[in-house]
Amino acid sequence: MHLLHHQVQDKPVEKIQPQTNNLSEAQDEHIAKGLESMVAQSETNHDVSHGIHMHGKTVLEVPWIHKMIPGIEKLAANYHIGNFVVVRESGEKIFESMPIYARIGMHLLFYGSARETVLNYKSVEHLLQEQSIKQGTIYNSPESAKSIPSFVQTYSLDITELLEPDLTKYGCFNEFFFRKLKPDARPVENLENPKGICSAADCRLTVYPTLSLACKFWIKGDEFSIPNLLQVPVDSPTAIEFDGASLAIFRLAPADYHRFHCPIDGVVGEITNVPGQYYTVNPQAVNEPKFDVFTANVRSVLYLTHSATGKRVAFVAIGALLVGSIVWTKGAEKGTEVRKGEELGYFAYGGSTVVALFPKGVVEFDQDLVKNSEEPVETLVKVGSSLGTSPA
């Protein structure tokens, strides 16, 4: 089941003043042309490290980008363009660079004049949607397969864990992007414990026992609420069912394995598709006040009945900037029993996010994840890694 390129809603976005440094020398038109140019170049330039996956230091080596976006080289030189995450196994904090397209998308959203025309677009939202769809089309073409080797090199990917490690066997870049892993590549912790709950993705993870804690430490947008996320009325049975729910937020970076898996033993239920935008879901955007990317972006909600408690879990797959589609595989098979660690679906090109909502009494998160999330910092985890258990 495919969720493809939803119609964008014309919802004005208030101009926001974030804490991150802006591109003060560049006009909206410069930024928009820069994003357009990077997407267009990805069709012929197969070195992704000098295109949309440019990182801070690389920006200084690519003359065309500073000519197109005045001030970008100063931003790259003076500010860390990225985020710190904690490696779960070692507790070590490491810095992960942010691809340049995410930084540009953030600038347009938070500093751009969203109500005004940008180039030939009606708004920033239409620019981001159009470029997201265009990037997906480019990466579905056979020619795009030439970008796979540079992508592997740029992100130092381990191809030995792939079900198909021969890079020449992928027909296009997107086929590699939603690549499959060998069956034993992601062992599931507590597999035989029906109350065990596991990570749904290779991701940077934050967990919060309550919505108020999630909003205190991580999600700063004042539009975020469970009814808004699920797109249901505040007095509906579903909103009441998930009142007081716990949240797990799985953020997938572009280099990650992009198939998402079931966190529980349960039964597949209904899917609700929600139209929306294509904003970046980078933490620097999620942490901004007065605006919430999770409830603004295109998303698809799968309801799973948890076998151990009989309660429903809401599994929300959220699209993002340069993400072309959300595809449900086993998650589309209503009534099917599914075990934790089994695949539910995948994202086509772009980093994105899954938010899982667990009603009261369903999950008690592992303490190391809770501690890191309250710092707050994301924890680097793999599919199948323990998320917690249902209380006795």
Image (tube, rainbow, N blue to C red):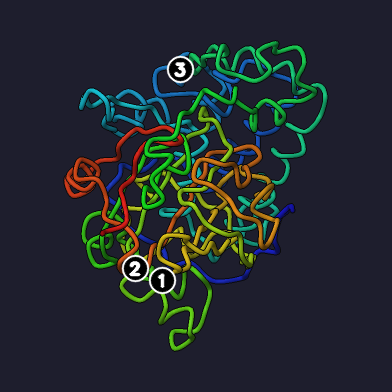
Q: Which of marks 1 and 3 is in front?
A: 1
Q: In the displayed structure, would residue 368 be above or below residue 221?
A: above
Q: Do the residues labelled 3 and 2 touch (CB within 8 Å)?
A: no
What secondary structure is marked by label 3? helix
Give the residue pinned by disc 1: 226
Q: What residue type is labelled 1?
A: Ile
Image point (77%, 33%), residue name: 140
Residue 256 marker: none
Indicate left or right for 156 with 271 as reference: left
Which of the two labelled residues, at mark 1 and mark 3, occupies the earlier sequence position?
3
Image point (63%, 45%), residue name: 345
Report the Cα–Cα distance between label 2 and label 1: 8 Å
Give the residue pinned by disc 2: 245
Quadrant of res 15: bottom left
The x and y percentages for residue 374 are 18, 49
Report the Cα–Cα distance between label 1 and label 3: 40 Å
Q: What residue type is labelled 3?
A: Thr
User: Crowdedness of circle 1 by 10 Å Cα count: few (<14), some, many (20+)?
Assistant: many
